[in-house]
Image (tube, helix red, strand yellow):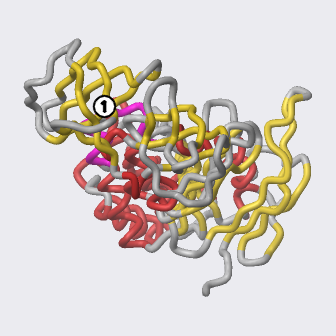
Amino acid sequence: MSEPLLQAIDLECERDERLLFQNLSFSILPGTVTRVEGPNGTGKTTLLRMTAGLETISSGEISIEGNLINNIHPRDRDIAMVFQNYALYPQMNVFDNIAFSLQIRKLEPQEIKQKVEWAASVLNLTEYLKRTPKELSGGQRQRVAMGRALVRDPKVFLFDEPLSNLDAKLRAHMRLEIRKLHNQQNATTIYVTHDQIEAMTMADEIVIMNGGIIEQIASPNDIYEKPNNLFVADFIGSPAINLIKGEVTDRGSIKLKSQELPHQKNNLSPNQKVVYGIRPTDVQIVENSNVKAEVILVETTGSETHIIAMLDDNEFRIVQAGGRTSIKNGESVSLEFDISKAHTFDQMTTKRID
C-alpha cells in the first residue's frame, strides 16, 4: 500500500477563544480525491487554510511526503488552492491571471508561456486568454482559477467549495471538468463541499466532520451503506434517510407506537431502544403488508415520485422511479422494506449496531 502523501496528526484550531476542532488526524494517499463534508462552522475551510499555510495551526502537525510543513511559508509548501470566490485579479487578462504565480517565481517568459498555454488547452480556455474576468461566465472564471493552480504543478490541490456560486447545470458540467482534470493529472486533491452529489460522485474518500471531530472517514459507498452513527446517516444522502425510534421485540422486529417494522439482525436485545433507519429508495408500496402508512403529500420530479406519509407518528418518505402515480393524499398504503439495507443505531450512544 502507498505511503500517505499528506498527513495531519492531532490538529487543533482555536479561534476567538472557541475551539473549532481538536485531535484531528487523517492521512491522504497520493493521487486520490478526498472530500471534506460537515455542517457550517465545523472548520472545513479552516482546515484547508491551515494546510495551505493561510491559518495558524494552534497545535499538531501537517506533513507532506514525511516533511513537516507547519512553519513553511505558503508559497514554499507546493500546495495550490482554488477559492470559492475565484480570487481573480480583475485588471489582468486570463493569461496574466494564470501566469501570476509563475511570474512571481521569476520563471523564464517562454516557460511561462508554455505552461499557461498548456493549462488553457486542458481547460478549454485558449480563446479567452486575452479577456478580463468581467468578460467571462462563472464557469469560465472558475476554470481560470483552476488553471492558475494547475500551472504550479503542486503536490496537493485544495478546492474550497469551487462550484457553490454556479447554477445547477453549470455545476454538473464543472464536476465533469474537475474529474477529467484529476484523471489526466492524477493529482492529490482535498475538496470541501456542501453538495452531496459532488461528494458522492467525485471522491475516493469522504471525511465527515461535526462539532470539531471527525465522525467517519470512508469511501462514498461505505459512508452511504454503513454510516458509523446517526449523524452520518442523517447527513449523507438526498433525500435524507428515514429515522424512526423504536424498541426491539422478542422476535427481533422494531416496535413503534402501534406497528412493528421488520428487521433481520440477530444481535439486538429484547427491549433495547434503537433508531431504525431505512433510505426512501429502499421502501416500496405494495398491495398488502403488515406496515401501513397514510399519505400526506405526493411530489413528482419527472424521473421520480416522492411520497411523504405518516407511519404512526413519524413522517416517512418513499421514493419511486417514474414521474406518475395513482396514489393520492389521504390514502392508506402498505409498505415493504428491503431489510437487507436497513440500519439500526443505539438511541443512547447514537452508534451503529452491526
Q: Is residue 89 visible?
A: no
Name the residue beneath numbered marker 1: 167
The count of marks equals 1
Is 73 contained in the magenta span?
no
- Residue at point 26%, 16% (across, down): 297
Q: Secondary structure at mark 1?
A: loop
Mark 1: amino acid: Asp
Q: In the image, is residue 132 above or below residue 354? A: above
Q: Position of residue 174 (x, y in %)?
A: 32, 48
Q: Position of residue 59 (x, y in %)?
A: 91, 52
Q: Position of residue 77 (x, y in %)?
A: 71, 63
- Residue at point 20%, 14% (across, down): 329
Tell me the crowding category of disc 1: few under 14, some 14 to 19, or many 20 or more residues within 10 angstroms, Cα based: few
Horizontal arrangement in the rendering, residue 5 relative to residue 259 (left or right): right
Q: Position of residue 320 (x, y in %)?
A: 20, 38
Horizontal arrangement in the rendering, residue 104 relative to residue 195 (left or right): right
Q: Nearer the viewer, residue 68 or 237?
A: 237
The quadrant of the image that shows the N terminus is bottom right
Q: Is residue 271 visible?
A: yes
- Residue at point 70%, 58% (across, down): 75
The quadrant of the image that shows the C terminus is bottom right
**Corner quadrant of residue 51:** bottom right
Q: In the image, is residue 111 above or below residue 126? A: below
Is 163 contained in the magenta span?
yes
Horizontal arrangement in the rendering, residue 98 relative to residue 9 (left or right): left
**Corner quadrant of residue 167:** top left
Q: Residue furthest front?
A: 250
- Residue at point 29%, 15% (across, down): 296
Horizontal arrangement in the rendering, residue 257 relative to residue 353 (left or right): left
Range of the magenta residues? Answer: 162-174
Q: Nearer the viewer, residue 34 or 207?
A: 207
